[in-house]
Amino acid sequence: MLRLFVHLARRPLLPAVRIWRRNIQLRVVAATLLMSLGVVLALGFVVIAQVSMGLLDAKEQAAQSQAAGGFAVAQEKANTPFAADGPDANDNKVGRDASTWMNSLVKQLASGGQTAFEVAALGAGTGEESGPGPGAQGVKGARASGNVDPTASVPASLRRAVNHATGTFKTFSQIRYTAGAEEKAPEPALVIGKRLTDINGAPYDLYYLFPLSQEEESLNLIKVTIATAGVFVVVLLGAIAWLVVRQVVSPVRMAAGIAERLSAGRLQERMKVTGEDDIARLGEAFNKMAQNLHTKIQQLEDLSRMQRRFVSDVSHELRTPLTTVRMAADVIHDARVDFDPVTARSAELLAGQLDRFESLLADLLEISRFDAGAAALEAEPIDLREVVRRVIDGAEPLAEHKGSRIRVLGDTQPVIAEADSRRVERVLRNLVVNAVEHGEGRDVVVRLASAGGAVAVAVRDYGVGLKPGEATRVFNRFWRADPARARTTGGTGLGLSIAVEDARLHGGWLQAWGEPGGGSQFRLTLPRTADEPLRGSPIPLEPEDSRSNRARAVAEAAGRGDARGNGDGRGQGGPGASTAERSAIPPGSAVAGAVPVPADPTALPGNGARVVARPADQATQEDGTGGR
């Protein structure tokens, strides 16, 4: 479930991930934006912290100076000597109680603030728990200016500190207003308090409340300014990075596009070069490379065209003298009974070599058609079983001469495909004849199968097999496993080359597998319908009775503790092999307990190549093969 959830969550992100991986300009710009954003954020935090600290320090110093002066004035008024009349009679002790004096003191001290600060006075011990909230103005011993709720605005921790110690104390809080005043939101403030004595010598607490609204507005303005400037700087840096990277990436993209068009065959494409910088030198070097490649390819094409024309012309020109020589050779061959033994044998050799010469000339003409692109496919629905029967009928004399038997598997059901019967028969004739010639007198198995949109024919022999790397070269023209050995089997060396071209003309595969001393298997896979792409083959390229498969079966049986080992029919022919297949395997071909050997890494899917390396216990056996 977790894997399914991750898969479903990743699916919508795949297009974005693909764009991210393929666009280097996007990655560079995104990295620049992220780094710029980090720098701007760090710088903004530092600037805001410094400005905030500076504003608070200046406010705190000014507030402490103002509060110290107010505390001194309040204590001085409390200590003012008796005066019956005079201009300060209202502030003297004569005929007044402490409550009236305190109200007058708070009003007088707050009158110099002009909204710069407020003053609150609390009797000793007033509201030491928590403030009573709105309506606390009526609490005995609590006075405040500007409709300030003194007990709610002065924190309890500050009141406890002032009540239990001497000196000046300060803290940050919020100024709250009484419910009877105009609706006014609380505002941050710096509260400074100190314990004093009134006109009767009784202690009370005097507090100065300095609003921080202006400082908060200034700080907010600075934050907005820094944020706006930061966004502008980040966007500007992103645009600059986009333009700078584009100057570098655009020529690279142009070079990539031109390289793709060059690889598609448009050899006249060139880069547009402007300036004298590094990019311009890169463009000039690229254009020079493209020009040299164009020249070399044209030379090779001309040479190849001349070579194909030469082969085609020579092949056609040889047909006339070859026909004349054939007529003369036939006359001599028919009259050989009248010759002496040496001359009669020479006539027989002449006829045989003329047959081979005619076959070679026909193959050369066919190869020249493939090279010139003139080969045409005449596809029609055919039953491959009929083609296989004709091929086997033609190869039976050779198989009897070699002491081999040709077995057919999978021919109980029709194997229908749209193909050129002549070309398919030529491919299968090459495969079957090669299997008989190189099978060392052992059985040859031909298997047919169809599945999905593909049909396949596999030819399996149990002869000398193929050495590592040979399956990648077995389809080359005139290739021989041992170049020092002469061709004694009569082949031209072009059979498999023509066969693989016939398979490609059908849109199919012709692939080979082999192991030294263990035989080989050639598999022809064709689409069931013409022009239908192949996605797989119904017959595995490596046969079930190969050494690696048998060793794997033995290892699996040993792992399950199967002491008998052959109870499930895996001793010969591989898992699930039919009786006919097992009987086709020569005695002693199985290597019990052999270690599976990895395939040749040069054997790529679809190129007709796969070879199993020679086991270590057979490294001393050198089995050669003739040209296939």
Image (cartoon, rainbow, N blue to C red):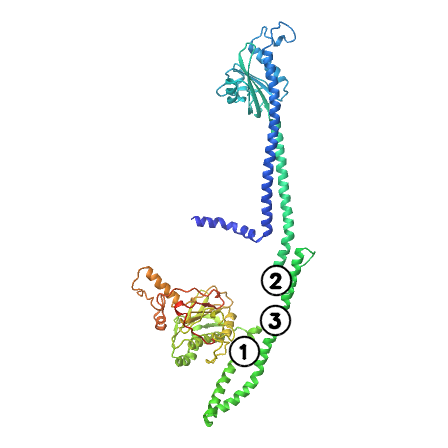
In space, the residues marked 1 and 3 are separated at their CA atoms by 19 Å
In space, the residues marked 2 and 3 are separated at their CA atoms by 18 Å
User: Three-letter amino acid code at disc 3?
Assistant: Glu
Image position of 313 with respect to 555: above or below = below
Q: Earlier in the sequence, mark 1 or mark 3?
A: 3
Residue designated by label 2: 261
User: Three-letter amino acid code at disc 2?
Assistant: Arg
Element at label 3: helix
> Does any portion of residue 546 appear in the rendered image?
no
Locate residue 413, reporting x and y percent.
40, 70
Q: Residue furthest bottom?
A: 338
Locate residue 387, reporting x and y percent.
44, 75
In space, the residues marked 2 and 1 are separated at their CA atoms by 34 Å
Residue designated by label 1: 364
Locate residue 151, reporting x and y percent.
53, 20
For this rendering, which residue is in front, 589 or 371? 589
> Does any portion of residue 348 appear in the rendered image?
yes
Residue drawn 65% across and 6% down?
Answer: 86
Say whether residue 279 is left or right of residue 560.
Answer: right
Mark 3 crowd level (few <14, some 14–19, many ≥20, 10 Å Cα): few
User: Three-letter amino acid code at disc 1?
Assistant: Leu
